[in-house]
Amino acid sequence: MSSERRLRIPATLESIKEAVQFVIEAAQDAGLSDDSIYHCELSLDEILNNIIEHGYALDKDGQVIDIICQLHDDRLVIIVEDDAPPFNPLTMPDPNPEEELEKRAIGGWGVYFVKQYMNQVSYTYTPNKRNRFVMEKRR
């Protein structure tokens, strides 16, 4: 059995809280553990911040982000779609957590943690010219 919920938010930092709450409720309904819910919360927050700050950096006015939660028997799938220029954050090299703190490059840690926290992540640029970032968390 599966079901789907959708939310559209303006591409503003202030809208992230509403989107995170939307995903928390979906994760609770999916029966995820408290740790897994927190992983979903942090991951969505990171992806939305990246879209708003980097993807829409030059033109946020009137832009929107769609969040789709698909509840399945064994997992929650979170889909984030936006109209920013195409960019696959998964192609960026992972930062090295073993590297000395002073030598670490700035950036890249958020997506690194998303990949660690979620069971599966993927990116596509859809035929209708939208970025589509998919995160999956299994029970």
Image: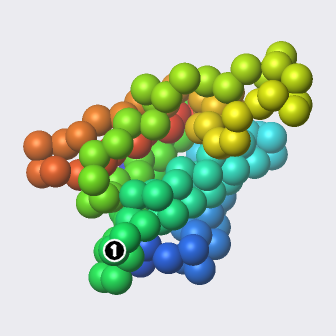
Residue 55 occupies which quadrant of the picture? bottom left
Position in image of residue 21 (x %, y %): 63, 67
Position in image of residue 84 (x %, y %): 31, 58
Q: Amino acid at mark 1?
A: Asp
Position in image of residue 25 (x %, y %): 63, 61
110 left or right of 15 in image = right
Position in image of residue 72 (x %, y %): 47, 37
Vertical placement of 76 versus 81: above or below? above
Q: Which residue is mark 1?
A: 59
Residue 32 visible here: no
Count of numbered circles in the view: 1
Q: Quadrant of the C terminus?
A: top right
Residue 45 visible here: yes
Q: Is disc 1 placed on a helix, strand or loop? A: loop
Which residue: 11% across, 43% down? 127
Q: Quadrant of the N terminus?
A: top left
Vertical placement of 1 versus 55: above or below? above
